[in-house]
Every structure is written in C-alpha cells, then in structure tokens.
C-alpha cells in the first residue's frame, strides 16, 4: 500500500488528487491538505469583481466531493516538510496545522510515500507598502477579494452617476508582479461596465504595468497570427486598450501605495505618483513559505526551495545571461532533484528563469514581469505528476513516462469583457509553446501557426462555456476525466 499526499486544493492539486484516485486502487491512500474548505474557479473571480457573478457561482465545498471520490481531506495548512522523518517518525512527513472548526490549531505529522506540493502562490501584498484589500487597493485574486472589489467599484459607479469624476487604476502592484492577463481582463471589464452605464465621460481609466511593452504578459510578448497578418502582442494589446478608452503607464514598478495615490519608479529611473479613486493592483507572488527540515532538525529549506520559496524541480537553475536561456532549461516532470518522491505542481514550482528580458532602472530596481503560470499548464502539470506517481506505484519502476514542459505545451488566454450570451466580447490568444524556443522556431520564437489572436463574441462564449465545464470537472461529475485540463 502506498500513500500519496497532495498539498493545496487549487487548480493543480485538485486535478492531481482526482487523477490519483482514478488511477490508484483502493488499497492506496490519497490525502489532500488544504486550508480553504472551498474550491474556487479563480478565472471567474473577474466576473465577481464587476458584480456579474456571486462568489457562490465560482466556488463549491470540497468535503463532499472528496468524500464521494474516497480522498482523505484534511482542512489544514502545511507548515513544514520533513523528507527524512525525525526522531519520532521513521519516514517522510509533512507537519500540518488544522484550520477546520472541529480540530482548530491541532498539529499533526502526515506521513507520505509520495508528496506533491501544489500550494500555488502566496499573494505577497506585504512586499509593496500600502498594497492590498486590507489597505488602499483592491484585488480579484480570491472570491472574497473580488466581492470586496465589487463593493468598492459600486461606490465609484454611484459617484459617477452623481456627477463626480473617478479615476481607475488597474495593473501590477509590484515591480516583479506577474498575472498581467487577469488585471488586463479586469480593466476591460470595468471599461465595459462603465460604457454600459453610459458613464464614459465621468471616468478616467488607466492601465499600469511593469511590462517593457504592453502585451508582454510575462512571456516576453509574442507574435500572433491575426486575419492573415503577423502582429506583435504590443499592437494587439494597445489597440484593444484604445478601443476600450483605457490609457496606460508602462515600465512602472509600483513600490508604495497611499490612500488614493500610488508611487512608482520607471525603468529610466524616474519616480512618479498617480492618483486614483479605485485601484486593483496584482501583488507580487512568492511560494507558500513552507520550511523543510532534515532528520536531525537542520533547516534544509534552501535545498528544496528557491529564494522566492517556490520549490526547485528538474529545471536547469544555473544562473546564465538572457542570451543563453534555452527551452530545455524548463522542467519536464516536476520532481525535486534532492528527494525523488517529492514533486511540485502548478505555480508552486520555481521556474528556472523569467521569460521576459530582465531589466533594471539606473537605481538598480528590477522592473519586469515574472513568468505567468496560467490555469491550463497548472492543470496539465497536476495531471502528469499524478500519472507518473501512479505509474511508479503500480509498476515499481522509477521512470516518468509522462512529461509536460512549458517550453513544449501551448496555452490559451481568453480575456473576456461583459457577460451573458449577447453582451460579451473577448480577445483570445493562443500561444505554443508558452516558453519561447528560439532554436526550434528561430524566426518568431513560437509556432506561428498555433500562436493566434482574435477578438469577437465567440471567445466570450468559450470563456463562459469554460466556466461551467471546468466547475463540472472539478466537482467530479460523471465522466469528468473526459474534459481536458
Ligand atoms: C483573478 C485571476 C484570474 C485568472 N484568470 C485566468 C484565466 O482566465 N485563465 C487561466 O488559465 N489562468 C488564469 N489565472 C491563473 C490561474 O488561476 C492559476 O494559474 C491557477 O490558479 C494556479 O493553480 P495552482 O493550483 O498552482 O494554484 P492555486 O489555484 O492558487 O491553488 C493553490 C492552493 O494551495 C492552497 N495552499 C496555499 N498554501 C498552502 C499550505 N501551506 N498548505 C496547504 N495548502 C495551501 C491554497 O489555499 C489553494 O487552494 C487567473 C488568476 C487570477 C488571480
């Protein structure tokens, strides 16, 4: 009998446990540790943030789903990993602290044969003074944050209806923030809602970003095929913002927020402020902050984790200049190089380097986007990690037949504004591969046939369809496994 423990019931971890349970017989135990009693379909939080969906439409209780599937669910926070055990416990374990009502604050050592760290990003609001929903800006990163953002947005809309002009500032809240796509989608949704209410003359809408050029999206930008032409994402993105009446500030590293004012430094070393009435700025991301300890109690966190506390896997972390980066630096199987029964899936794994060209201001401030890890790769990685672990348990072999490099797989990004069947519009961008491969595709860095951008209603329908389809899959309803990640 083997025991697999997965940490984090987000897109990656939830996918992983569901497949582990499907592939492994009942004699094997599958455990999931996650603090939130709900699953949330994060991409739809954007719609919660503009009042078009209620939080209940993007989340559901995890416990009944795990009960149905036969997965042992512990509503708890993983604190530390002990890959060699300790004086009391012979094998590897994770120390957890319960957050559930009945066991609140109790600690437990959960042993494992295989461990999957899928704890996603820590939303590091603390890295920017004054940032976050408890301070001066809004967030749409969780359904609670998004519901709070909608409350504040309604106040701004009301003021405009009463004749008071409002400035909206949406974008990145840290010089190294990622997830530009989500913020971009939010700014378009806000612009759409303002237009729908005929309040355009009362609104001044701004996009602020750490990107060197718009459309970088943390992927170093892309060339997309559109109506038979090859267009850089810079043009694609700028034209969409223009169409929606949004102005922009680029190459900006936000380092401080005060009430109604952000402070930012630009790549040319200048310091500026921008006043706002409503701001939604994405924080920097870090790993979950778990520690790791050897059997003798020595802190071995730096062996397992990179400096940003994301987990090191089978990537090439050798520091090298931008010009020498290769697609093959990116991991394939997400296995820890120090403990072969530990894996990291989704945002929890440390990328070997960024994808956008690193830049810094004359003052030494690094201002560029870190790599995005969107839902699709997070789900695919969760699945292949589950497949490989199940393969090893069933065959006793130590190989990994399933691989999923972000330098090989494609991803689709749908930025949808508006809601409902007839009122919405979306920009759809597909890229393949996600990480540029200049050896294989010397001209464009990616396959120009599979890297496409379109704007229209069809993409909006797709996003709406995906909302229902992925929630159906996450609830493990009949034949859920037929729906791709
Ligand atoms: C507003 C927004 C919109 C987005 N829109 C899109 C989109 O349209 N398309 C797209 O592809 N991607 C989108 N993304 C990105 C997508 O949501 C992420 O790629 C995805 O959620 C990452 O999955 P994950 O499992 O790695 O992390 P998460 O989904 O964040 O899950 C991590 C889980 O780990 C748990 N956890 C954290 N710490 C611990 C701990 N110590 N112990 C145990 N559990 C822990 C968390 O509670 C959470 O359940 C969006 C992101 C945001 C914020």
Image: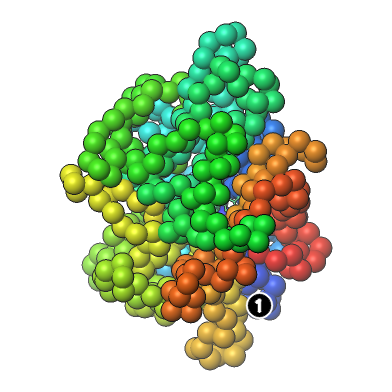
- Please identify the quarter of the rendering in which residue 340 is found: bottom left
- In the rendering, at what x and y percent does residue 42 appear? 59, 47
- Please identify the quarter of the rendering in which residue 391 is found: bottom right
Mark 1 neighbour density, 10 Å: few (under 14) some (14–19) many (20 or more): some
Indicate the quadrant containing the C terminus: top left, top right, bottom left or bottom right: bottom right
- In the rendering, at what x and y percent does residue 131 appear? 38, 33
The reply to whether residue 450 is in sight is yes
- Name of the residue lying farthest toward the front: 229
Q: Nearer the viewer, residue 30 or 171?
A: 171
**Residue drawn at the location 70% of the way across and 72% of the way down:** 22
User: Is residue 187 positioned above or below 155 on the image?
Assistant: below
- Label 1 sits on residue: 24
**Residue drawn at the location 25% of the way across and 33% of the way down:** 271
Q: Is 166 displayed left or right of 16 in the figure?
A: left
- Name of the residue lying farthest toward the left: 363
Q: Nearer the viewer, residue 357 or 393?
A: 357
Q: Is 210 displayed left or right of 395 in the figure?
A: left
The reply to whether residue 393 is in sight is no
- In the rendering, at what x and y percent does residue 280 appear? 48, 33
């Amino acid at each position: 009998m083997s025991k697999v423990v997965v940490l984090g019931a987000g897109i990656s971890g939830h996918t992983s446990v569901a497949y582990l349970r499907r592939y492994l017989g009942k004699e094997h135990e599958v455990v999931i540790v996650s603090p939130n009693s709900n699953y949330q379909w994060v991409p739809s939080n954007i719609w919660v943030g503009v009042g078009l969906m209620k939080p209940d439409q993007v989340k559901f209780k995890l416990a009944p789903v795990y009960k149905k599937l036969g997965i042992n669910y512990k509503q708890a926070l993983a604190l530390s990993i002990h890959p060699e055990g300790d004086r009391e416990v012979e094998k590897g374990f994770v120390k957890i602290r319960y957050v559930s009502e009945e066991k609140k604050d109790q600690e437990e050592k959960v042993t494992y044969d295989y461990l999957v760290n899928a704890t996603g990003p820590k939303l590091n609001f603390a890295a920017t003074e004054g940032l976050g929903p408890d301070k001066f800006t809004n967030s749409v990163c969780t359904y609670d944050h998004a519901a709070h953002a909608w409350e504040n947005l309604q106040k701004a809309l009301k003021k405009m209806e009463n004749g008071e002009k409002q400035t909206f500032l949406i974008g990145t809240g840290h010089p190294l923030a990622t997830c530009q796509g989500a913020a971009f989608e939010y700014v378009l949704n806000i612009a759409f809602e303002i237009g729908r209410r005929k309040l355009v003359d009362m609104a001044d809408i701004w996009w602020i970003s750490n990107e060197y050029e718009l459309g970088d999206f943390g992927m170093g930008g892309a060339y997309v095929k559109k109506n038979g032409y090859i267009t850089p994402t810079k043009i694609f993105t700028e034209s969409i913002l223009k169409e929606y009446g949004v102005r922009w500030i680029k190459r900006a590293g936000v380092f401080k927020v005060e009430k109604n004012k952000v402070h930012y430094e630009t790549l040319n070393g200048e310091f500026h402020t921008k006043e706002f009435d409503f701001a939604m700025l994405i924080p920097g991301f870090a790993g979950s902050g778990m520690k790791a300890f050897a059997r003798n109690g020595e802190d071995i966190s730096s062996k397992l984790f990179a400096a940003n506390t994301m987990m090191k896997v089978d990537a090439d972390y050798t520091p090298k200049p931008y010009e020498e980066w290769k697609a093959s630096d990116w991991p394939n199987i997400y296995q820890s190089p120090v403990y072969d029964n530990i894996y990291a899936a989704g945002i929890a794994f440390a990328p070997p380097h960024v994808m956008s060209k690193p830049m810094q201001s004359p003052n030494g401030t690094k201002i560029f986007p870190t790599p995005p890890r969107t839902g699709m790769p997070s789900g695919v990685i969760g699945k292949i990690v589950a497949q490989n672990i199940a393969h090893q348990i069933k065959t006793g072999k130590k190989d990994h037949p399933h691989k999923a490099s972000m330098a090989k797989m494609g991803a689709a990004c749908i930025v949808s504004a508006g809601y409902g069947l007839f009122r919405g519009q979306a920009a759809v961008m597909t890229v393949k591969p996600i990480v540029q491969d200049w050896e294989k595709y010397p001209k464009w860095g990616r396959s120009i046939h599979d890297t496409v951008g379109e704007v229209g209603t069809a993409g909006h329908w797709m996003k709406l369809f995906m909302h229902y389809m992925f929630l159906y899959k996450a609830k493990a309803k009949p034949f859920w496994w037929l729906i791709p990640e």
